[in-house]
Amino acid sequence: MSAPMLSRRLLLTETVSSAAAVGRLSRFAINASAWSPNWLKPAAISLSIPGIMEGLWDSVLRAVPKKKTSHMKKRHRQMAGKALKDVKSLSTCSGCGQVKRSHVLCPHCVETHPVDIFALAVTDKQILSASGTSSLKVHSTTDPDFPLVQSIDGAHKVGCHHVVTNGNGSRAVSIGFGGEIMIWSCHDGVWAKDGGASVNKATPADVWAIALSEDGQYLAGVTQDGHIKVWDLDTNGEEIRDYETKGSFGTCIDLSADGRFIASGHENGSVYIFSTESGRMPFSLSGLVKPVRAVAFSPGGKFLAAAGDSKVIVLYDTSSGEQVASLSGHTAWVMSLSWSPTGEYLLSGSFDGKVKVWSIDTRACVATHSETDKAIWSVKWLAKIGRSVGFATAGANRSISFYREATGG
Amino acid sequence: MAGSHLDGMEAEAFERPTNITTIPQTPVQSYIQETLAAILDELSSPEGQPSITLKQRGKKFASLFINPETLALETSEMQRYTTYRWPGRDENEAWRFSVALRVLAAIAEAVQEGLVVSKRDIYYSDPACFGTQRTVDTLVDDLAHTMGVDRTALYVEAAAKGLVMGYYQIITRSGAVVDVRLSNQDTLVPRTQDVHKIDLADVAWAVYRRLASSSYHLQSAAGKGILITVRPNPPVTFQETYQQLQGKGYPDLNTRAFVRKLLDHSRQLTKRPQFYALVDGDPDGMAIMATYQYGSVAFAHENRNLNVPGLHWLGLRITDVVAGADPLEDNTLIRLTKRDRKKVVAMLSRNPIWAADGPEPEWRVELQRMLMLNVKAETEILYDMEGGLIRWLDRKLSSG
């Protein structure tokens, strides 16, 4: 794991490069217009040339860079078999059946959403993504090409901002910008609306972030006015818990793997932990000064990580509530956190497009990825496939990027 | 959403009546005469039931669509007619009838005298009867719609709210030349029916926003331009900052007509000026920009004559602010209010401009990002940035 992570990522849009081009153009344009009065008097320039250079001047202007590959040299290289070769390693995409280059993601499949992807959720075989479009997309993670296996169209008319799954991947819950909560169940890798489960309609429509328990029975949500609610999805979505906090917008929520604790992060910087058994806060956490955007329990439930606009990731000990570490290194808002399945590593994504991997043992950043300069909305570790470990990131660059542990390096 | 604001805001301060030469029998005059005559006939018979029938403007969001040819927000709703009778079924219908009659009478008077009245004048002639200004506004617009004419043909106007400053000359219908090119004072947006021709030579851009610098339209690095802004309601200057914080500034019909006139005139030029919208990064800002480019819901039947296709979105975007103004971030970003969030969701779900398959996916994303981050950005932020708003505008206009 300490080996560097390799990126397997496909640029789907040329926005990055074209934006850079525009930037260059704009700077040029400003210079040109700022200097334009000087163009009116070129006489001053020619006058300053010393007489001895007069004959030379023309050749100076005509000079070309010396390192120019001649046609003959190019041809020699080609004859010697050193030139660019034809791409012959083509294969058929297992997802859509179209021809693609081997060992490279299928461009038709990875083209997931035409707009920002706001959330990712993983099961042992699949990854679900929610975006500003009305559909949810499902990609297989067992296939090295990550083909698109299902598109749940018309799930959320105005777009979806959170999607969560339970531990074994049998149930998923998504919530849209309109406030509607949808429950999905998975049979043989195909998702469909879960007819047997529901969330009580009596609840006000201002739930923002959600989390699902490991067995998929309980759904926890934090509302825009700071309430933390729990619903039992198997008994008609009855609301079984309602914890009140100070009323600050609830931005994120997480359930511990054993289901004993709920953590929520709020816009005023507060972080709360509730015990689901007693319904109380075992201790108050020091919180952050600025809005919290992500909270995550470690797989063993020993730590709680929280991060947000303050750009540092804070680790709390869940048995004492003490702050045990703060990981700093991000230079923009931290938008998403995810623990590796073993709890050794913590993954974070920030608004400037940087993705960092942190070692919990050494409390240090072991890898930084900056494939994009657009905001990362969600990061998620993938389920372990064989011996390889990897993760996925998604955000304002409108594609899902998959990373895996480097092999042979 | 934009429409409901418009309705309320076009009712405006007192407008100085302008003399207009009498014109021969128009559709307006004949309609008024016929309607009033019919009512009188009914009144004179003992069993008579005087009535007024109005063609109502569409109010259903479901019937709105973007016309691919005009690029305007239009409605496919079938014409709905409502008839108010007197004495009618109940008290409410009787009141509706009398209110409609009074408004019609006021219009008849204005048309006959050739004097322009404002909707506010009509309302204040008997506030107790009309109840709210909105009643009058709706009726006037419905009457205009029924007669199939522009509201100005009824000699009823809302006070001008738009202010303009820029490098242009106007030739009025009477032949007078109004040259405001070197002025650095805001002037009211001229009435478009008075404008014969606009000289836009050398104009490179037009921005809908007031700027702090009084002569930016002459000194901009991007060339000479025109600035248009919409006066907050009520037009009290010392409250301006406050009003802008309220996110207002929806353009009235006259301002939109003027902007459209600029666009139409610019089409004849070889070097066309570009049109830009500089709006706050909040739901109202996005709605204002949409009103200019596609039109409002309330005037879906007139949008095809008022929209400004090809409008460029200058800013301000949330991502610019979050990424760019980090050291200042604490005091620059403002949380969305409950109303803001409701408005964004309504815009996303009801208006075809922001629909998933709509014409402006980037606008949709921007609204969704606002919801995700729960922040909005106001243009005032740019004043605090390095070089201020002027530098920022220069950069944006030159690169755009």
Image (spheres, coloured by chain):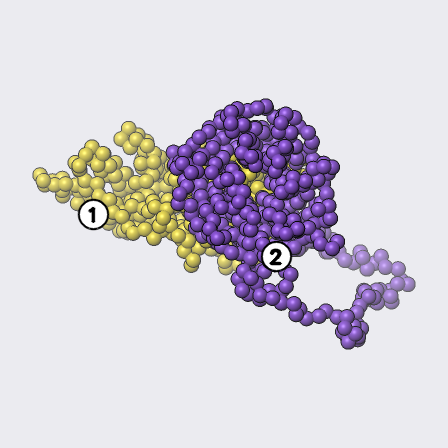
Q: Depth check: give the residue in front, B280 or B161.
A: B280
Q: Residue at x 51, y 56 (%)?
A: A149
Q: Which residue is mark 1?
A: B34
Q: Nearer the viewer, mark 1 or mark 2?
A: 2
Colour yellow belongs to chain: B
Q: Secondary structure at mark 1?
A: helix
As drawn, the residue found furthest toward the right would be A52
Q: In the rendering, at what x and y percent does residue A291 appear?
A: 59, 32
Q: Residue at (44%, 41%) from the top-left corner?
A: A181
In the image, farthest residue toward the left: B46
The answer to whether A385 is drawn above or below residue B45 in the figure is below
Few, some or many C-alpha atoms within 10 Å of disc 2 (few <14, some 14-19, many ≥20)?
few
Camera sees residue A240: yes
Q: Colour of chain A?
A: purple
Give the residue type at disc 1.
Glu
Location of residue A263 by image quarter: top right
| Left or right: B4, with B186 as reference point | left
Q: Secondary structure at mark 2?
A: loop
Q: Quadrant of the N terminus of chain B?
A: top left
A88 lies left or right of A125: right
Residue B311: image x %, image y %? 51, 51
Alpha carbon distance from label 1 to label 2: 78 Å
